[in-house]
Image: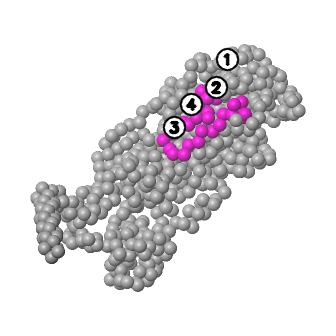
Amino acid sequence: MVQEREEGSLKRIKFLKIAFVFLFILYAGRLFSLQVLSGEFHRLRAQNIARQTMPIPAQRGEIFDRHFDQPIVTNIDSFAVSVIPAEVPRGFMPELISRLSEVLGVNREQIERRLPRSVFFLYQPIEVASNIPFSTIAVLAEQVDSLPGVSWQSKPMRNYIETGSLAHIVGYVGSITREEFTMLYNLGYQQGDIIGKNGIERQYDMLLRGTEGRETRTVDVRGRNVTGINTRLSPESGKNLVLTIDRRIQTLAERALGRRIGAVVVLRPSTGEILAMVSSPWYDPNIFNQADLSSEYQALVNDPDRPFINRAIQASYPPASSFKIVMSTGLLAENAIPTFQTVECRGEIHFGDRLWRCHVRPPGHGRLNIQRALAQSCNVFYWTTGRDLLGVDNIVKYSMEYGFGQLSEIDLPGEVRGLVPTPQWKERRLHERWMAGDTMNISIGQGDMQVTPLQMANMVAMVVNDGVIYRPHLIKEIRDPRTGAVEMSVGREILHSTETDPGVFAALRQDMRRVVTEGTVQYPMNLRTVEVAGKTGTGEAAGIHDSWHSWLVSYGPFETEDPDERIVVSVIVEASNPWEWWAPYASAIIYQGIFADQTYEQAIRTLGFSETNIIRGRRE
């Protein structure tokens, strides 16, 4: 028995010896692999883990108007303030936050959100405020000995020199949000980046933002600096952008519209260049440079006039009688009515259970052919021909050819399509059948028809260009930020074209000229400086009784041998303004200022009218 136990013990000892030898060989092989075979790989990995990389912000590119003389958006020096939480003594953080809030003028809650308890152990700097001016940094520097863990670094701030109606064009910048970071991560964006939030700043952010630089330091396991700067990669500034906007025309259009709620688009039809785009009311993009903007931003958000909306592309309205240009195009192109044939207007027609009144001339226009019908803007003519001769399918067809109900693809974010109602749309959306009365409504640009001021400018551009619309754009050139050399110029690009006979558009131009010489805008548009052709419109505001939008879409010069000399002007004044039929007057001021090289005040005096002598109550 004893011998058996001794033999068992010897076997166990022998097994353990073999196991120990095996484990020793295994560990020795592993150590050999780590230290010899893969030693270089792991040394590099350890060094990388011990390195801390800090970004160096790049200067955003500047933005210029078409003359490339003075920037309208540039950068100014500012600073960002950071805190290294682990360097703040235990229990001192609440007092530090209070003192920073007082010195920086930043809401205490904003700093607390960036310094939760979960980061108190970190030796990495956490940005708590940005866009801090040098004067504030100077005050902070005087107290730095009593503010442990606080540091600051240069962080350029956007400066919007032109703070009027250009706000909707250039937009503004801000810190990247969590949702934006999720979408843009694969494009190289990082937490804490400053990105474009609206307008050109957003549309061309990848060009404007440039490339960040990098500083690399060696740190210990807790993130504390062990050495100074190991490597430094300098940042590359973003590209400079030259807009198609003419600052003088922009200011003129802005002054002509005034503080009324509405929009103006000035377009060069031969290229699609936007020379001016005004949306009122606007906002000051420099407010986003403030350390604490919550109150001002909230006031803008809650403003019932919606100043953040670019009404030129983000608001849609019934085109009203301006839509009769589309109707005349269809009637002429389809040979639906000979030019000599007339329709009698007695001021009203009975259809269905409703009396349809021609508000332009209640007694009636008498007998009109298509040329006089457009000049006099006779509703009865277009109700009758739209319902009986052209039909809803053709109205929809020519509306779509003019680009209605579609994006213009302008290089700005947030554009809306508007709406061209169809029988299918009404059946699907309202669960109702299309009626002849619906056709009559859209025949004069009312009902559910919705367009943007830019789409209306494109409509006139198609007439001017004999059936071609060039894609509207705001970027003229991209330039090198150091040398100013042109890296890319934006040329014209066809957006829409039609096979309609150019003779139709030639006839339309003549008829649009009659609107000015014989029709509804003889007084305000009687300019000696330049001959203008166009069409007015008075759109009924949905849900607001006896309230009207004021339209004028036009172009000039009426005749010219140089297509680049022509401009299209689209103006709408919303029904929320007191009725004054201001769109024709604003347009006259713009044409006078552009072609006579005059300021707003000079144009007003030359034209002989002011904002106080407008013919009130007049409707077209």
Residue 461's tag is 4
Q: Mark 2 points at which residue?
A: 398
Q: Name the residue under label 3.
A: 409
The kind of residue tagged 3 is Glu
Sequence-earlier tag: 4 or 2: 2
Q: Mark 1 points at which residue?
A: 334
Q: Is residue 418 magenta?
A: yes
Q: Which colour scheme is used?
A: one colour
Q: What element carries label 4?
A: helix
Q: Quadrant of residue 497?
A: top right
User: Going by the picture, which residue comes out furthest to the front?
Assistant: 1
Neighbour tally class for label 1: few under 14, some 14-19, many 20 plus, Cα within 10 Å: few
Q: Where does residue 194 sit, x and y in percent of width and height?
A: 41, 58
Sequence-earlier tag: 3 or 1: 1
Q: Quadrant of residue 148?
A: bottom left
Q: Does the magenta stretch include residue 329?
A: no
What's the residue at 59%, 42% (across, down)?
416
The kind of residue tagged 4 is Ala
Q: Where does residue 204 sit, x and y in percent of width and height?
A: 42, 46
What's the residue at 40%, 59% (across, down)?
191
The kind of residue tagged 2 is Tyr
